[in-house]
Image (cartoon, helix red, strand yellow):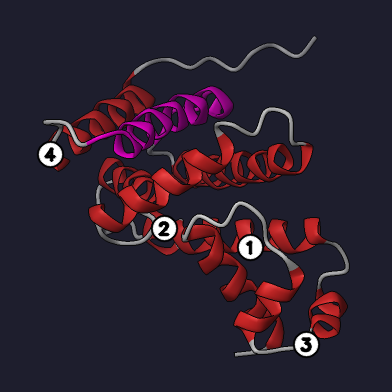
Amino acid sequence: MSTRDRIIAAATAMMQEGATRLSVRAVAARAECGASTLRHHFPTQRDLVNAALTATYDAAMPDERIRDTSIPPRERLRECIWRLLDPVGTPAKAREVWTNLLSVFAGAEGDPKIRAGYQVLVAQAERRVGAWLAILEEEGVLPPGDNARRSGLLLTIVDGLSIARALPPSDTSLEDEAATIGFAVDAVFDVAFPVKPTP
């Protein structure tokens, strides 16, 4: 693993553990490199945070399954959306990650750096879901439509389920969550999302 990758891995792990700020010294120590080496790869703290957030989403949203045409298209999209909800593989760990993220971002209205970090997460999610929808559209299995609106629907469902996971445990089961995602995916395929006319 390269030094840059070690730095990103260290920053990502600290964010998942609930660190509200990524100090250069703490990340460098965890990555087992010097602060000047970290600054060489990431001149600003914003560069470091953006790289860690992007790496988190890239790991959580692999693209290869969406291209596997041996799997029905709805199932492929459901699986990819589920990966957004369970980015670390297990519901228990995902609950911990969502709780940490919610605690960091929910009360950060006055902190422009934290708000900027949240916007990076949103942009990464929109970019990736939009790419998945475009792949399905190009295959001809998803009718042409407004993929920005489709993406917005799917991400709203993921946001709602993730917030529910961050709150105290309820009677909601994994089957209920999977069914909710399934309903949203069915809507994407079955409901008309006409492209808005260009002004």
Picture layout, residue 28 above or below residue 84: below
Mark 2 touches mark 4? (CB < 8 Å):
no
Point out the stretch of residues depicted in magenta: 142-168
Magenta segment, prevailing SS (helix, strand or loop): helix
Secondary-structure class at tag 2: helix
Label 3 neighbour load within 10 Å: few <14, some 14-19, many 20+: some
Instruction: Out of 148 and 55, give the one closest to the viewer.
Output: 55
First-in-chain label (2 vs 3): 3
Q: CA distance from mark 1 to mark 2?
A: 26 Å
Instruction: Out of 193 and 31, give the one closest to the viewer.
Output: 31
- Quarter the C terminus occupies: top right
Secondary-structure class at tag 4: helix
Q: Quadrant of residue 107?
A: top right
x%, y% of residue 132?
48, 46
Q: CA distance from mark 2 to mark 4?
A: 25 Å
The reply to whether residue 62 is in sight is: no
Q: Nearer the viewer, mark 3 or mark 1?
A: 3
Q: Nearer the viewer, mark 4 or mark 1?
A: 1
First-in-chain label (3 vs 1): 3
First-in-chain label (4 vs 1): 1
x%, y% of residue 45?
80, 60
Q: Which residue is mark 2?
A: 67
Q: Which residue is mark 4?
A: 175
